[in-house]
Amino acid sequence: MLADVLGSYRQALRLVGPFVSIHVFFRLVSAAILVPLIGILVGVAISFSGQSALTDQDIARFLATPAGAIGGLAAASLLIVSAILDVALMTAVLRSGAREPLAALRTAIGFSLRAAAPLARFAAGLLIRVLVIAIPFLVFAAAVAFLLLREFDINYYLASRPAEFLVAAALIAGAAAILAFVLIRRLTDWAIALHLVLFDGKSNGAAFAASTERMRGQRAGLVGRIGLWLGVRIAVSAVVAFFAALALAALPDLFGTNLRLIAGVLIFVMLVWGLIDLVISAVANGALADLLDDAFERVLAGRPASIDVHPRAATGWRSRAAAGLAVIAGLSVASLAGGGVLLGNIDAQSEVAIIAHRGAAGSRPENTMASVEKAIEDGADWVEVDVQETADGQVAVVHDSDFMKAAGVDLKVWNATTEDLARIDIGSRFDPAYADQRTPLLGDVLAAARGRAGVIIELKYYGHDVDLEKRVVEAVEKAGMADQIAVMSLKYPAVRKMRDLRPDLRTGVLAATSIGNLSGLEADFLAVNLGEASPRLLSRAEAAGKDVYAWTVNDPVTMSRMISMGVHGLITDEPALAREVIDYRASLDAPGRLMLWISDRFSLALDISDADEVEQ
């Protein structure tokens, strides 16, 4: 078995030139055609919702509509095409006998044009089959969560992990393990279905059925070979990454305090690392193509495939040289363009707002007056708090739907009165020193922040709101702080309602996940999860005149990376640390900030001790 895997890797190494050429071609096709096409499909589907983007729970609700289901299926099918196209093209080259880079590239281009339609149909068929298998397990997991984890707020279960949470986690984990086993078994059954469609001319149904029949008795061997293939792939990448990290970490010792020289060498090492990683990916995908093609040949049992793939002519060393130059030129242009944008962002000095998440929640109980006061003392530009309505119509500052996590009290916020808030200790669980802390009202926070910091109010909804938006507006007007307030929510209709009630208030859309064009939503700013923050989002938001805030950013290097990326605000539990990072960055030149960015991206222990000196 290991001999088969190593043999496939040797075959891929012999064809490294053609495979690298195809791999680069595949990336170009993905970037120029597949990714934009997926974006268009998603945009068209979302247009039926009347919005330019959907966030969080709205995504799931939209996928349950006809337009969402069709758009989701089409986009997911294209994602599958993107995932398998590289290996499919390499398989075509293997079967064609092309051995020169340009000949292989011509073969791949011709094959991709002929195979586009059957490949798309195959991807849709595969997706539907996987969904049919997965949906019952997903329904089971949802039912377990509904039956066992609905009594209290989910944050209580995550923080305290009571017995019912552990039971639910075990049941869901068991279902996930069974689903993984079933999917691996079925995907192994279908291992050569793609080959039967592309190279033997079979329909989807016939290909899946024939693959299942022919792979009987061969599943374990194929799973073992693919497991070994993956192990070799990971091991080689890990070794390369290890030596690259050593090289990066050693630069301060080698070049002393010359930050500009260090930055230049860092970029060079990253480019070389990227080139090596590209070659590794191409060789690994080529080896996988060879493994699967061997399985296909065993099924054919000596007969020729119905569809022959003919190589396109090319000439010797000129072909290899031209392909090599094309790859190098493409990488160089991409690296220079991307590096220019990165260095431009890193070199730029911009104002970044510090937004204290639920106050200074890293050092005080969240959403308390103690955390609000600490955030202001620590230099926060904005204090962010969550608000809900109480049973007696007050606007309380509280995040969860109940008080279980904060105080161990089984009381829903919408059932609580002001008197209840006054008796529930929400500070002792954080630290007994804060036993005097109680849930404040929005008016208390506004009074404390007036003239000292702005307040960002997040509207929280658990299905029991009465007139939250209007009551928030009344509290803001009573405090006379309309020019020091911003309002945001995960619920986009609430944001639009706030804009209708008080058009002069700053409003923002909060998003943990999203699809579509966030910058097209009606809001003054976007508050996004770290994983959603990207140069593309920032570019589109700035073009639309919107700020972008990233949450929750609690370590100094990630703070610096977000600032280098160009975010306009850091939502953090550690406002004092954020202020230190911003002040410290101001003392660094561009190479120093570049080192901070790279140390975060590659998890290196680099410490810039002051503006002129670098230490490991």
Image (cartoon, rainbow, N blue to C red):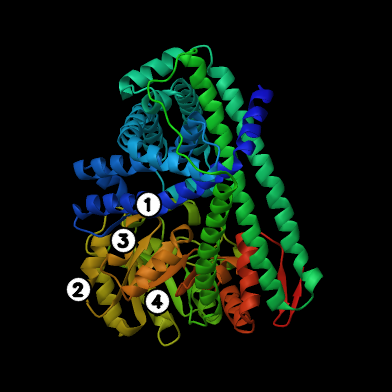
Q: Is residue 165 left or right of residue 193?
A: right
- Residue 464 in the image: state x and y as whole percent: 27, 54
Q: Residues within 10 Å of mark 1 (few under 14, many from 20)?
A: some
Q: Is residue 322 left or right of residue 508?
A: right
Q: Which residue is mark 3?
A: 517
- The alpha-carbon separation of the residues under discs 1 and 3 comes to 14 Å
Q: Say which amino acid is labelled 4.
A: Val
Q: Say which amino acid is labelled 3.
A: Asn
- Residue 312 in the image: state x and y as whole percent: 45, 38
- The alpha-carbon separation of the residues under discs 3 and 2 comes to 25 Å
Q: Earlier in the sequence, mark 1 or mark 2?
A: 1
Number of residue marks: 4
Residue at 46% from the left image edge and 48% from the top image edge: 25
Please tell me whether mark 4 sits on a helix, a strand or a loop: strand
Q: Earlier in the sequence, mark 1 or mark 4?
A: 1
Q: Say which amino acid is labelled 2.
A: Leu
Q: Which is in the foreground here, disc 1 or disc 4? A: 1
- The alpha-carbon separation of the residues under discs 1 and 2 comes to 39 Å
Residue at 58% from the left image edge and 76% from the top image edge: 576
Q: Which residue is mark 1?
A: 35
